[in-house]
Amino acid sequence: MKKISLFVVGLGLLATTTLRGQGLGNSPYSALGLGEVLPSANVANLGMGGIGVSYASPFYLNSQNPALLARRTRFTIFEVGLLGQQKAISQIRANEQQTQRDFGGNLSYLALAFPLSSRWNTSISLRPYSFVDYQSRQYGKVPGTIYETVLNYAGRGALNKASVSNGVRLTKNIYAGVDASFLFGNISSTSDSQVLINSTSDIIVSRVNRVGYADAFFTFGGAWRPTINKDYTLNVGATYSPRSRISGSETDVYQQIQGGRPISSSDTLRNSIAGSAVLPQQFQIGVTLEKNNQLAVGIEAGVQNWSLYRTISDQPGNLRDALHTAIGLEYTPKPNSTRYRDLITYRAGFQYNTLPYQVDGTQLTDVNGSLGVSIPVGAFFVNHVNFALIGGQRGALVGTQIRERYFRFAVGLSLNDWWFRKSVID
């Protein structure tokens, strides 16, 4: 009971943190869609290119394919992860490269998984789904006059995901699962326009838009693990998230401001008007070759139809379909050894992603590489401290594109214990 209480307290702390809209720092492209969607992989998977649709280790919790929960043993597992990011944001302005450096971090996830029977495992988790964090300024000129204009844009917020997942082993090698998630949170955006005549007395027209979301969506998973020979096993996995409507409400307010004070009554165009945004369908598939918990090599791909995204007011989001591809490797020198250094697990991975953002007719890409390691701790070395490093770039210094070169670092803790067992008295 004490362990469960600690987990509930942890969930409350994560909810408090994520609802404040903390993300990974300034992200200009988070102004589009539902914000910048965060990776769904746990730290161990991040170190191997995010591979997890087709592969799950018995020592770590898989959060990407609910079917693979059934691969877990009789042990209960608790995991927590932290994710930070440092990046340089660059753009060509007036034929000169301008660069801004930024840093951000957040508690990435809390998750608990436990067996309900020898064939059935379940998990509960809470993690950020996406975040919005941007601020930009644009200068212009009033046609036919000498006066300049300035437009300021800013956004802040986050969507969080609370999930209950179940995985069942149907036959010796076939697994199926379903994840039920509740998406909730708020996103606020502001835009100010001003004609620069006298900086102290200029009138600013300010718009504030706030959208709150709260609704459920589902992900279905399947896996097949045929044995090739006594040493090798093939892992095939797939997940599908059908198109969903995420209900919410929108408030849209205009107001005139002078000298930092409102000079007119607010003009409310929309006041808590109910609506629903379209969350596009997503399909992922992967294949991993595994050797006796010692070596795993996998490749995965996925697509999400963001071109079908609609805002809460049923407007197109001007996004494109996103494509995700990844390869990953995991290696443990001697998994059955009693020597500590033989039980350290090493990982590496690579991703090539086509993003849903388009600038000047060009769809942006995200290319990154990753390294990871898991260090065993505690009795019998069944618990692990996990680390992952990811370096990559998205966008390019072409036209009006914004290039982001980033370095992400993640740390996580995996704790395994045997909770539900009958006491034996001799």
Image (cartoon, rainbow, N blue to C red):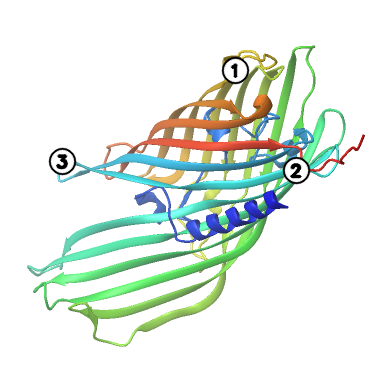
Kind of residue sitting beneath label 3: Glu
Say what secondary structure mark 1 lies in: helix
Say what secondary structure mark 3 lies in: strand
Quadrant position of residue 208: bottom left
412 relative to 341, above or below: below
Q: Which residue is mark 3?
A: 96
- Mark 1 or 3: in front is 1
Q: Which mark is residue 7?
A: none
State the quadrant of the C terminus: top right
Task: List x then y, in percent, for residue 422.
Answer: 87, 41
Kind of residue sitting beneath label 1: Tyr
Q: Which mark is residue 114?
A: 2
Q: Would you say residue 50 is visible in this rendering?
A: no
Kind of residue sitting beneath label 2: Phe
Circles 1 and 2: CB atoms closer than 8 Å: no
C-alpha separation, residue under disc 3 versus residue under disc 2: 56 Å
| Horizontal arrangement in the rendering, residue 159 relative to residue 394 (left or right) | right
Q: Which residue is mark 1?
A: 340
